[in-house]
Image (cartoon, rainbow, N blue to C red):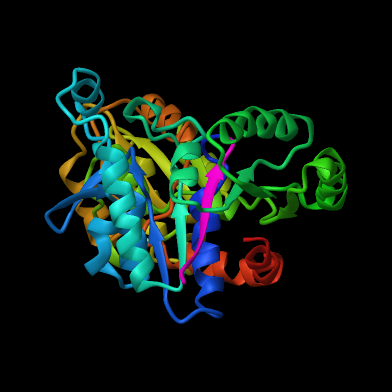
Amino acid sequence: MCRKIFIGATGQHCGKTTISLSLMHLARKKYARVGFMKPIGPKWINFNGTIVDKDAAMFSTVFNVEEDIALMSPVTLAPGTTRRFLDGEIDSDAPRRAINSACAELEKKYDFLIIEGAGHGGVGSVVGMNNARIAAELNAPVLLVTGGGIGNVIDAVELNLALYQREQADVRIIMANKLVSEKRANTLGYLTKAFARSNIMVTSAFDYLPTLADPTLLHISELLDIPLKGDPADRSRLCHTIQLGAASSQRVIDGLGESTLLIVTSSRDELLVTASSLHHIPEYKKKLAGLVIGGHAPVSDITQRIIDDSNIPYVRMKETSSEIFYQLREHVSKIGPEDLEKIDLINSIAERHIDFDAIDAMI
């Protein structure tokens, strides 16, 4: 009989996908066959000719189960789906049937199945299948991922628990994530007190790590929807700092942090030439991850030749440097199948901080 767990969250960006990756890695040490499912896919892509959720596509690639992709992502919310559903063009029971059918097939193939929700408990309500209802429908015990505070976490959990209880879903575990390292013990102590009467296990996952939140050069390229040029071997490199190259060339270079993504206006020939030239020097290559070149003015021919010759990773945009800077600063990085550095880091930390046997015993 297949064991199941539903990974929910109190809101966006709590770390559901990171936790799901961790549990997949840990479960594969204990179970021969471990599967993944994303019942509702609000962020879809065309993956090998099939419209599926981005996370499902990522898991299928990382864990080499591409043949199951249609089952892993049975319902996607592509543009127009909401209106078609509300207008009655889509059978109101179709999402429920698709999710149940896919889950039943996956249960036949796997010993342990991780079911990842989308956003907070209410996401999916527009098609009649919110996270809480899906967990209840699939009879999957719920692990609820939260942030790393105390008061705000308790408030968010209580808000979500009301919906899960209404749908008669079984929330068994609260997992605090992105904890402040020096406050970990204190935070867990108070969260355990807060839910002591609920019979819900309180546990923890990761401390907050900027490395896990930082985007790769490839993510920057995808976010800006511009091809990444330069050395393709650097596409998975993490950008720990985003810096606007507004000062003099010397001050900009002196101020480079670790693995900086430098945003430079196209007319700043001297800074573009300097940054490109430094790409050949190991000391500066560690500091300078790549360039985003913005602005309507064309890059001069000789400067462009120097940039291309250096093989420094870069993207070229027409927006102003300030517009690009604020767009990137608001970006929250997600994990993709190419992010091998992040995935390896997640797995190694999970082995130290997540007690899979304790979680398994609760479900």
Residue 77: x percent and y percent? 27, 35
Q: How many marks?
A: 0
- Residue 121: horizontal and vertical position, in percent? 52, 34
The residue located at (50%, 32%) in the rendering is 247
Q: Residue at x 19, y 26 (%)?
A: 80
Residue at left offset 49%, top offset 62%: 21
Bounds of the magenta segment: 1-10
Between residues 238 and 84, which one lies in front from this camera angle? 84
Q: Is residue 303 above or below residue 159?
A: below
Depth check: 216 or 29 in front? 29
Quarter holding residue 44: top left
Question: Dominant secondary structure of the magenta stretch?
Answer: strand
- Residue 343 versus residue 169 in the image, above or below: below
For the residue pair 193 and 99, the one nearer the viewer reads as 99
Queried whether the magenta region covers residue 236, the answer comes back as no
Q: Residue furthest left?
A: 49
81 relative to 277 in the view: left or right = left
Left or right of 142 on screen, residue 21? left
Pick the front one: 341 or 142: 142
Q: Position of residue 322 (x, y in %)?
A: 41, 25
